[in-house]
Amino acid sequence: MNTPSDDGCAAVPRARETNLPSVVIERRVEWPDTDAAGHYHHSTVVRWVEAAEAVLLGRLGLAHLFGSTPRVHFEADYRARLWFGDLVRVELRVDRVGAASLQYAFTVRGQGEEAAATGRMTIAHAAARATGSTPWPDEVRELLLKAGPQAPELLT
């Protein structure tokens, strides 16, 4: 089923109906990740999500997209606290692929199964020196639609 969207990813496949890419990474809550209340700072989630994106694009052979995929929307719901030293799992999933953009969905979890943060990030493809978004190259779009889950990056 193709679903219209307000984020520029109109009439695109949903993750459950295709083999869209995803990855899980693990990180620890570091001292600079915390705020005056002692738990993780909201901005840390952005960094973790972008770290997962870098791993995912690297695994897909798409690291060359760095510098041509500006963020156009980021939203997060913060549901539980994570504390200094906690192990964190970040799952990043390609949720929708449009002609010139894509939407990621993410879930951040601590030690248990409870989600500490969930949200979405939309990026656009903008070729070098373009004045606006540009369509994904065919080979990139193919990978973004069919590459499936990637091996996790786990801390040892």
Image (spheres, helix red, strand yellow):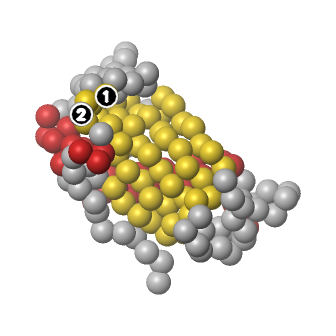
Q: Is residue 126 visible?
A: no
For numbered disc 1, what is the local secondary structure?
Answer: strand
Query: Disc 2 marks which residue?
Result: 1
Residue contact between numbered discs 2 and 1, judged by CB atoms under 8 Å: yes
Vertical arrangement, residue 120 with respect to residue 58, above or below: above
Report the residue at 58% width, 72% height from top. Answer: 112
Residue 72 position, x and y percent, is: 48, 29
Report the residue at 44% width, 34% height from top. Answer: 122
For numbered disc 2, what is the local secondary structure?
Answer: loop
Taking depth in this image into account, of 111 and 59 the one nearest to the observer is 111
Report the residue at 34% width, 46% height from top. Answer: 94
Query: Disc 1 marks which residue?
Result: 3
Q: Amino acid at mark 2?
A: Met
Taking depth in this image into account, of 129 and 83 the one nearest to the observer is 83
Q: Is residue 30 visible?
A: yes
The quadrant of the picture occupied by the N terminus is top left
